Each structure stands twice: as C-alpha cells, then as structure tokens.
Image (tube, rainbow, N blue to C red):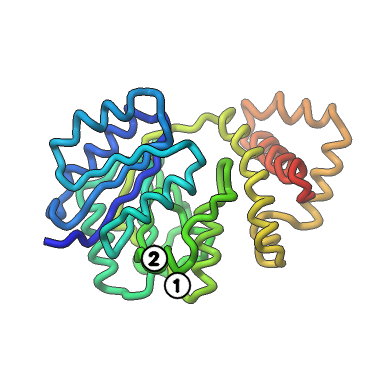
Amino acid sequence: MAIKISVVIGAYNQKEKLQQTVDSLFRQTLSPDLYEIIVVDSDSNDGTQEMMETIRSRFAQQKHIRVENRGKPYARNRGIDEAQGEIVLLTDADMIADPNLISEHLKAHEKFSNAAFEGMTINPDGLPYIKEPFKPWQKLKFSYFLSGNLSLRKKALLDAGKFDEDFAGYGWEDIELGYRLSKTGLHLYYLPFAVNHHNHEVSDEDMAKRKFDMGRSAAVFLKKHPNFEVRTYLGLNPLATGVFNFVSRHPKIQKTIGERSANSKIFRYLLEEFNYRKGLRSQGAL
C-alpha cells in the first residue's frame, strides 16, 4: 500500500520531548501503511540518535536523518525532499498528536485539492494557540501558516521553493512561506478536528528573549518582501516606531518596563515589543 502522507519533524537536542511526539505518532488511528514519520535531526548531542535507533523496530515507516545544524528551514526542507507521500504534514519535536491527527489532515486533502490546512494546537495551559473563534473550514490569512500542525501537498512546497534557508534564527520562516504560497492562489483552511498538544511551556523571560530573535527574523522577511502589506503585518507603523525610538532614548523608562514586566501583563507586552524592535533595528530595519 502506497504512503499517502509524510509527517516531517525537525529536531535539535529535544530527545525526551521528541520521544513523546514520535510515540504519539505511532498511536494513530490511520493505518500505518498509509503514512511515514521523518525526523530530521540537526546534529543533536543529547542522545537523540540512540533514542531513535531503539524505537526503530516499533514502526516500519520511520526515518531518522542526521544533518549538520543549519537551522530549522534546512532540516524541514531535507524532510520534504525525502517525503514519499503526496501530502506533507509539518509538525515539531515538542508536539503530542491526538490519535486522529494524521487521518483528519488526510481526509481534508481528499475534500480539497488545492489547499493547506492549519490544525488546532493546544497550549500547555489548555487553551488553543489560535485565539480567534474561527469556524471549521474557514479560510485563514497567510499569517496563520503555522508549521506546528500544518499540511499541504508536497508539490505545492516544491513549486514555492520550500522554506527559505536565510531564516537562520527563531521565527517567521513558516509565515514567510505561507505568504509566498498565498500569492500562488493556495488557500489555507482551519481544521480544528486535527489536534496537537504543545509540550513546551515558554516562560515570560524566555519569550522576552525570543522577541529579539523574532525581530531579527522579521528583518529578513521584510527584506524579501518590502511592501506595505508585509510592513503592516510586521508592526512597522509610524506610531509603534515612534514609541520605540522614544523609549530607546530614555534608559529610565526601559528600566521601569523591565522591572514591572514580571508582575504586569501590560509591561510584559511593552518589554516584548521593545525587544522585538531592537531585533529589527539590529538588522537595519528600523
């Protein structure tokens, strides 16, 4: 029986979480003859290779590919190239799949021919990552092209050029690909029946640090698509830029924001936005 859908996971030093992810993908309701699991390991040094070897016998359609650490886009692109299925399901090493995850994505592609599907991802707090009350099968903007629970045809990925490997740091590589795909006429639909659980709680401190890296990656996005639509989406408007420039000139205000961010959602938001724009400025985008 031919493989119909390939699950592609990029991983780096996430052995314990990856094992839980792969275990959940072994326990799917879909016949194991119809799907494969491809783990592309970016030269992990935490025992990931040994762990993957110990579970090899439990699932015949499982590949572990070890590559040099050149970032998530490179790893995902290698997995896409290796995929035997017509459909590629992108997920992450810290996502635990519901038993019907793969079957729901496959059924969706049998219903729509030229489409991508964004499943429902549940955060560690039990709430959906996508907060908007979208209806099943509702069309989504490119900004919801989130690769922790996303499927589309391999041909569409290849025709679009796959992930842009210039995105070396955290953030935006999936949404930038979604932006390119949206320009080809590919529609993205919401598929809440396909559920993943994010097995990684991000602290407020970690998020504040991530925002700087997101700003750096946003500058890459903008360089590739220097238009009003992308600038607006990335938050590059005169008001936000003016506030950032003002705060940048006043160290006391920065200190106050940093001190109060631990106990205030408003100040935490301000700190994250400030760090995001610091990342943009570090790449000459502000």
The reply to whether residue 259 is visible in this rendering is yes
Residue 265: x and y, percent?
Answer: 62, 36
Residue that label 2 marks: 116
Residue that label 1 marks: 186
Residue at 49% x, 63% y is 161
Residue at 47% x, 47% y is 74
User: Which label's residue is closer to the chain start, 1 or 2?
Assistant: 2
* 58 is higher (above) or lower (below) than 134: above
Residue at 29% x, 55% y is 194
Marks 1 and 2 in Cβ contact (< 8 Å): yes
Please tell me how crowded label 1 is: few (under 14), some (14-19), or many (20+) other residues with Cα within 10 Å. some
Name the image quarter holding residue 51.
top left
Instruction: Indicate left or right for 257 with 204 as reference.
Output: right
Name the image quarter holding residue 47.
top left
Say which amino acid is labelled 2: Ala
Residue 267: x and y, percent?
Answer: 68, 35
Q: Quadrant of the N terminus?
A: bottom left
Please tell me how crowded label 2 is: few (under 14), some (14-19), or many (20+) other residues with Cα within 10 Å. many
Say which amino acid is labelled 1: Leu
Secondary structure beneath label 1: loop
Residue at 52% x, 29% y is 203
Secondary structure beneath label 2: strand
Residue 199: x and y, percent?
Answer: 37, 35
The reply to whether residue 120 is visible in this rendering is no
Per the model, the C-alpha gap separating discs 1 and 2 is: 7 Å
Instruction: Indicate left or right for 249 with 210 as reference.
Output: right
Considering depth in this image, is 40 or 121 the residue closer to the camera? 40
Q: Residue reaching furthest right? A: 249
* 230 is higher (above) or lower (below) than 53: below
Instruction: Indicate left or right for 55 with 165 as reference.
Output: left
